[in-house]
Each structure stands twice: as C-alpha cells, then as structure tokens.
Image: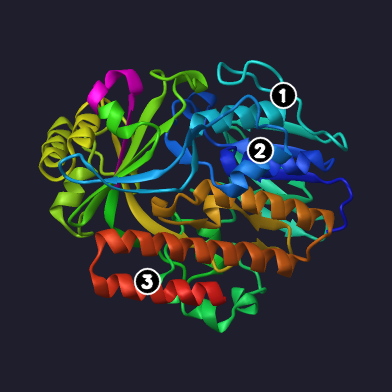
Amino acid sequence: MDGRPKTVLIVSGSLAGLMAGIDLKDLGHQVRIFERYPATRMEGQGAGITAQTDVQQFFKDCGLSEPPYSVYSPSLQIIKRDGSVKSTWNLEFENTSWNTLYHRLRAAFDGRLSEYCRQALDIKQKKGGNGVYEHGKTVTDVKFDDKGATLYFEDVDGGQGSTTADLVVAADGKFTSLAHERKYSDSYARVQRPARRYYHKWWSDYHSCSILRNRAPHVQRQYSGYVAWRGMVIEREISDESRKVFGQKMTFCAAKRSYILMYTIPGDKGSLEPGERLLNYVWYCNHAESSVELADLITDVNGHRHHKTLPSGGVRDEIWSKQKALVKEILAPPFAELVTETSQPFVATISDTISPRASFGDGKLLLVGDVLAGFRPNAALSTNQAAFDAVLLAKFVKGEMTEREWERAVLRYANVSAARSRVIGTYFQGGWDTFLGTLVRYGVALLW
C-alpha cells in the first residue's frame, strides 16, 4: 500500500482487532472497530494468557508496558502424582489475563478508562490518527470495487446500515456472516506451494466462516480428540501447602492421556498483589468426537449442546462432580485442591483452524489473529499471533511489504505455530504414531 491516510474498518474488537487498530491509528489512519457483542459481553473474560515475545514487544513499542500488566514466572516445574517436584526448567514466562490486556488496549485505542486502566496512557501518537470502537454491530456482507469496500451491518436493535472503507481487517474468530456467497476469481491456488498442499488433509473448518467456506472450500474443521477445562482460584483461597508448591512457577503435572498446567495471573482489576492474584489452570482431557461422553460434557444446564466453548456458569453440576473426582484420582494434590475449589469452570473443545489465504479482494480484506488461524492452545501462541499479525499489517499498510510478502509471512507464522501446538498436544494426548506424524508435519512447516 502507499501509506496515505485511509479509512480502515476492523471486524471484531477483541485483542487482535485492538492491536491492529492501535498500530494503524498510530500511522495516521481513521480506524473504526465493529464489535458484534455489547459492552457487557466483553467483561469477565478473564482467561489466562502467556505474554510471549511478540506480545511483550508490542506493548513495549506502544508504550503500554507500564504499569506492569503481568506476573513473572521464573521457571517451569514438573511435579509428580504425589506432589513432589520431579524437575525444574529454567524457562521464564510473563503471564497475564484477557481482561488485563483488553482494558489496556482499549485505553490506548479509544481512551476508554476502566478499573483495570484508570488513567489515559501516554502512548505513541506520531501522525494523529483516530480510533472509534462501536459495540453491537454485526457485519453481514461486504462488496468490493475499485475504490475500496462497502460493508453492510446490523445494529443490536435490528437496524441496518452500510459504510465504506479503504481497507477491511477481519479479526473475528467467529467471522460467520461476512461476505455471504460472494466469490472472486483470485483463487487461493495462486498462493499455494507444494508444502501447503500437504496441509489440506488436516486444515480445519474455520469457525463456520462463510467467507472462507466460499473462497477456500478445502478448509474444514477437525476436532483434536480432547478438550480443555479452564478455571481459576484467588491465590489466598488455596492452602499454604499448595501455594508453597506452586510459588510463582509455571507448574505442570501429567497423567495418562491428560495433563494440567497452572500459572499465576493478575487478579481482579489487574491486581498484582500476592494473595489477590489468580491461580489459572488449563486441564486437557481426551474425549472421542462421536462419544456420548463428549456430547454430555458440552451440554449446558439448559440442555443446549455447545460446539466449541461451554462458558462459565453453564457446566452442569453432575459433570463437574465427575471432573473433581477424576482430578483426585490422577493428578497431584495441589492440582486436586485447585480444581475442586473452582466455582466457575468452563470447557472448550480443541481443534485447529487455518485459512490457506490471508488476503482477499486485491488486498482490500485482510485476515489477522484467530480468524486467520485458530490453533490449539498447548503452545500458548494465539495472542502472540495477534501481535505478530498487527505489526506486519502496519508494515504492509506503510508500503514496506507487498501484499504477497505480507500474506506469505503471516501464513508461515500460522502454519508453524499450529504445527508446534499440535506436536505438544499429541505428545501428551495421543499415541506415538500420532505424535511422530505431527512431528514430521512440524518439520515440513519449518521448511515452508
């Protein structure tokens, strides 16, 4: 692109959308974010996040690193079934939460203050761009012409409207309604390489994304064979004995075809005070896709069966009672205490979703974050992908990268990260044959 001021519309105001919006606003562009959910729906999503290298660099470059937003973990420890330490690895982590990052990014993008971020942030503003964040707008269609894109949307009250933009950035992981039945001649085959064709048999369905369904029919969703239970407990509510075992270390415990990982994250309103912080965990358990057990597990208290995530408050008591009994049987006592003390667990089925394309409409529609690739959480790379994509998006808009160069770079990152996450997941959840197969695919991805 030529770098001249543009109107940009970002579909989704989650972390990937906000990161992209901040970088583009900083370049002097007029940026609008359409978020389909109301403001109340965006609260309380306090899931833990490991802030990897690209996230840390993004916050540093944007002047968002102070005050601190994460809990430092000096090492990774593996504990045995009896709770004793098996080994310790000198790996450092910065752990935070979705809430903490979201509210800080909102303060940077459109100046919205909250209990997580009480004052305006002194962020870089080089060229005077503008950021507007609008809740309750669901994009229903998009059309391209020589001048740019026209987006059609519905308001939360049912009203309809349209708007134009020079550039559309899709960051919504559930991007289900954009560009219904619209097809373009620039087939995804033009960007294919032999290594990427190798991925066709295990690319997954893209959150029912119609734009990808119509442009890349090979993309199909593939369930991994396991689910992730998530929960968190306030640090002070755990026994001194368990807190001593956990410390501030990333703590891991494995059983047959299952493992659990715990790390400390900021507490309510982003508090980093010991005792007020949260002990956040992810517990992976195998369930066959067609099993009655899985269907029962993802059916909520109202009898509704979910397909991806059963949110907190929806898990049935009898299902959670089984999990609490299981954790006492197979995992270390500190983890058993952590799980049994969880009052609002939630569970997600794990799958891989990667698009073979990142650019549509001659570069007028670009995919970033989860809508480009939603991979397994085992390697904790989803938020890092959002930061990586945002930085490269800014380079493309400035004219420092061509459309092809940008697309190849973000797709390579997505494929390597997905393969890496799959290797970790299958090592613990699958057999050796499955693990070795994913290891080979990881090697192919690195050569892509």
Q: Is residue 395 above or below residue 262?
A: below
Q: In the drawing, does residue 375 fall left or right of residue 412?
A: left
Residue marked by disc 1: 121
Residue marked by disc 2: 59
Does label 2 or label 3 sit earlier along the sequence?
Answer: 2
Does label 1 or label 2 sit earlier along the sequence?
Answer: 2
Identified by mark 2, the residue type is Phe
Does the segment drawn in magenta span residue 66? no
Does the segment drawn in magenta span residue 233? yes
Q: Quadrant of residue 249?
A: top left
In this view of the protein, can residue 433 be seen by the observer? yes
Identified by mark 3, the residue type is Thr
- Measuring from the top left, give residue 176's x and y in whole percent: 50, 51
Q: Is residue 291 above or below residue 88?
A: below
The magenta span reads 228-241
State the CA–CA distance, disc 1 to disc 2.
Answer: 12 Å
Q: Residue at x 26, y 59 (%)?
A: 429
Q: Quadrant of the C terminus?
A: bottom right
